[in-house]
Structure formats: C-alpha cells, structure tokens
Amino acid sequence: MGSNIRVAISGTGLYTPPFSVSNEELVTCFNSYVRQFNADNAEAIARGEVAALEESSAAFIEKASGIKSRYVVEKSGILDPKVMHPLIPEREISEPSIMCDMAVAAAKQALANAGISAQDIDAVIVACSNMPRGYPALAIEVQNALGIRGFGYDMNVACASASFGIQAAYNAVKAGTASRVLVVNPEICSAHNEFRDRDCHFIFGDVCTAIVVESVEGLCTDNAFEILATKLITQYSTNIMNNFGFLNRCAPGSENKRDKLFKQEGRKVFKEVTPMVAELIVTHLAENQLDAQHIKRLWLHQANSNMNQLIAKRVLGHDASAEEMPLVLDEYANTSSAGSIIAFHKYRQDFNSGEIGVISGFGAGYSAGSIIVKHL
C-alpha cells in the first residue's frame, strides 16, 4: 500500500554555534602544548624513551584538509594548553541538554522552511556520531521539547548518520508508519576530538542540521526535493574509531587510553573510503538509469577537500567546479553527519524543477549513503 507514496525533503535547518576558532588560534595553542611537553620530557626524549612532538602550522592544516576555521560550542577550554577540550558545564536533569537545545534550534528552522509546525510531525530521528547519554533517547527529549506526538529514536552511523537517517525517514513515510519525519543531526565533535594529536587536532567543528521528510502529497512548500532513491553500504573497519563507552569503567586504567577519543589512520581511510564512496554513487545512479550527465550537484560529506575532489571526479568524469561540488568545510571544518546537510542547506536554492543532485555521507564503520533527489 505504501509503496506508491512519493517522498520528499521539504525543509532543512542549520544551527551554527556562536564561537569560531581559526587555524591560527588552534595552532598557537597546540604548539604551546608541544613545546611544554617536549620540555617536560626532555631527558626521556634524549634517551629515546619518549618521542618528541612536532609542531603544527595553519598552512599545513589548510593544505592537508582545506579547513580554515571551525565553529564550536565553547572555545576557552579548547584554546587553553592545559585543558585542550571544550568546557561544558553539566546541566540539571530537569533542564534541556545542550544537544537538545541545538537540535530544537535547527528543527524550528527546518519546520519553518517546510511551511509546517511541530504538530505536523509524528516521528523524530536523531542521527549523529556521539550521543550525550545511553538513554533516554535524545530524540525523545527533542520530541518532548518541540511538543511532537508519535515516536522518536536515536541512531549512530558516524559521519554517514544523516544519510542513514534520511533513508529511515523515507522508509517510514513509504510504509505509512509516519506521515512526516524530522531528522536531526546535532554534533559536538569538539568534545570527542583529541586536540593534543597533530594529525587530528584541526579536523572537527560543532553544528546541528535538521531535515523534514514527508509525502509529496502533503507538501506546504514549492521548494522541495523528491527522494528518488536511497542506497546504503557498510564495511567493518577500525581505521576510524572512538572506543569510549560504559564498559570502560569495567577495565580500570583504560579510561584515558588514546582510543577513548576520536582516532583514525588517515592515509588508510583516504585510500579505502574514496573509491568505496565513488563506486557507491556511480552504481546507485546506474541502478536508477542515471549517470553523471543527469547530475547538477553533489552534496558530499565535508571531511577533506582533497577526498571530495577525487570522489567528485570519479563520479562526474572531470574535475568538479564549486557549483557541482560545493565545500563548506573551510568555514565549518568536519562536522561529521551534518556536513553534507550543511552543503545541501546552503547550496540548493538555485535548482529548477526536474534538476537532480546526490546527497552522500560517509565515514567510520566504514559506512556510506547515497540519496538521489530531484527538485519538484
């Protein structure tokens, strides 16, 4: 019965935190930490027992990633060489969590964008890399804060979470188990990043995006994108991981090991994920009788400009222009699941009826998703 229902993305929202940190600010803090570490461990370094740390530079960061700055929910702790993580006070249980506040802000914008109210939504999916707690679900907290009926649940597929969340919403509307679904992607990546690691201290930023998914028949906007098809893929790898969890307390002494924060083998990830994502998109297009000539734009996960350029070239068959493959990571850095949605949110207003694009998130797992959309 539900298979004949056409489904669309009718609205998107974006919450940007109030603080921005430039590469130069980050490098000043990092290099101060490095110099102090090397001084404190000078004798052990001289004996070969400890490896000396290497300083970073703004030029290195931009060349390696394309990132120039990032937004964060709190910056004083990040830029303190003795702290090097955001300082976020714990809230009372009776108060909304910080991630709920972010989600609500992005959701209200998405709802307004879709021309509907919270009362028109009957399901909430919070899809992101790191949840504030095991339970109750953040999605149910967001549902309560917005006054939404129905149900909500959390899902974590790392940087691909938004793509997976959109497919879950698409399937729910198709099946008739929900009429309108709100997908929210709150990311406080600064809280799980290791700012003392030269290879990743610059990668992440904080943000929240939101997407409204509903049937075409119920649309209240003329700026919607029909979801033509979705395709997901996963392949197990520990090359990107965060091993923090409740079992850590059961292994005393393991709490502060390096794997308890974001950790990756960057070169392996680049080599393995790039062809995986390109093949996924090319195959998905072919399965739907489409090819590069039909695609106006790729809204890709915003992790690394070099990776995105290579993926786009393999999909399109030529070097992608800024119009064909917009980047936002120069300003936002890697915002995990939210990156592709920031790009979609900011760079979709110039689409005409019938024009087609692809939203694609990819990352840890490995996991990747392809969402083919057409402007109605």
Image (cartoon, rainbow, N blue to C red):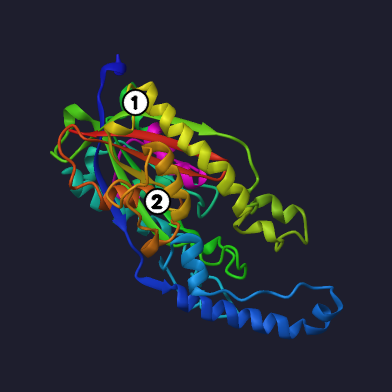
CA distance for labels 2 and 1? 25 Å
Residue 222 bears which disc, if any? Answer: none
Nearest the eye: 40 or 355? 355
Q: Residue 22 is drawn in which quadrant? A: bottom left
**Magenta segment: does it hold 154?**
yes
Q: Nearer the viewer, mark 2 or mark 1?
A: 2
Q: Magenta stretch?
A: 144-168
Give how far across and how far down residue 99 sits, in percent.
Answer: 42, 57
The residue located at (37%, 49%) in the rendering is 142
> Does any portion of residue 124 appear in the rendered image?
no
Give how far across and how far down residue 4 sits, in percent.
Answer: 26, 17
The residue located at (37%, 28%) in the rendering is 285
Above or below residue 306? Residue 155 is above
Q: Is residue 59 left or right of residue 345?
A: right
Q: Can you identify the residue that label 1 sits on? A: 177
Residue 338 bears which disc, if any? Answer: 2
**Magenta segment: does it hold 272?**
no
Residue furthest out toward the right? 47
Give how far across and how far down residue 197 sits, in percent.
Answer: 62, 67
Which image quarter holds the C terminus?
Answer: top left
Q: Pointers 2 and 1 in contact (CB under 8 A)?
A: no
The residue located at (57%, 69%) in the rendering is 195
Which image quarter holds the N terminus?
Answer: top left
> Does any portion of residue 133 appear in the rendered image?
yes
Is tag 2's residue or tag 1's residue first in the polypeptide sequence? 1
| Residue type, mark 2 in image | Ala
The residue located at (83%, 81%) in the rendering is 46
